[in-house]
Image: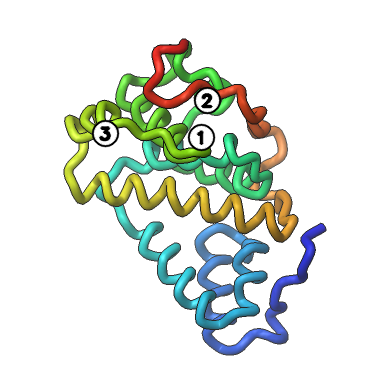
Amino acid sequence: MARMEGVTEERADLITKLSYRQARRSIGKVPEPFAVTAHHRKLFLGYGGLEMAVERSHEVDERLKALGEMKAALMAGCEFCIDIGTFISYRAGVTERQLRELPSYRDSDAFTDLEKLVIEYAEGMTSTPVRVSDELFARLREHFSEKQLVELTAVIAVENYRARFNWAFGIGPQGFTKDGDFCPVPERAGSVPASGSNEQ
């Protein structure tokens, strides 16, 4: 149960109602964090614009972005993010095996080298403190343009924002994952090696 109820459709202004309608068209329902944010109209519009920009940016392969987002969600332990992230990951072509082996991606052959690099980047960005070395970033630059790096970094950073927002408001899963689909569980804090380390 969330700590604060979101703005209902009956109480929403026209722009919020239109935003809710767009969310239902895109993912089937209004996400609870979206409805909670609607209590603050300026932030709702600004955050909605950011989410729309992220959703409509396609310079980076959707599967790569989904893997980065899911790694961040698992590390942050946001159950809402993991629920909706699983739904989005399947839509982007992430396999069940990849979701199962995401916590141990370094030792898995379910991922390409590029996928592992993106997951490592998400791991480094989501660590506290952040651990993104010059060497890791240099490896990313071998595969991504500047525009792509901005998009990839933004997607992972936004996932970190979502996770912390949802934790603070006690927002849990909302039933995006279909019955019978595998849905990963949060990673234990401290179980993830430092990004860029040689630990396997």
Give the amino acid type for the residue marked by disc 1 in the picture: Lys
Give the residue pinned by disc 3: 137
Q: For the residue marked with disc 3, what is the amino acid? A: Phe
Q: Is residue 69 above or below residue 187?
A: below
**Badges 2 and 1: C-beta atoms under 8 Å apart?**
yes
Residue at the disc numbered 2: 102
Q: Earlier in the sequence, mark 2 or mark 3?
A: 2
Separation of residues labelled 2 and 1 (CA atoms): 7 Å
The quarter of the picture where residue 23 lies is bottom right
Identify whether 82 is placed above or below 194: below
Front-most of residues 41 and 29: 41
Please state which of residues 184 and 170 is positioned toward the viewer in this rendering: 170
Q: Which mark, by number, is residue 71? A: 1
In percent of width and height, residue 51 lies at 44, 63
Distance, label 3 to label 1, CA atoms, is 18 Å
In the displayed structure, does residue 40 sit left or right of residue 142?
Answer: right
- Identify residue type, mark 2: Leu
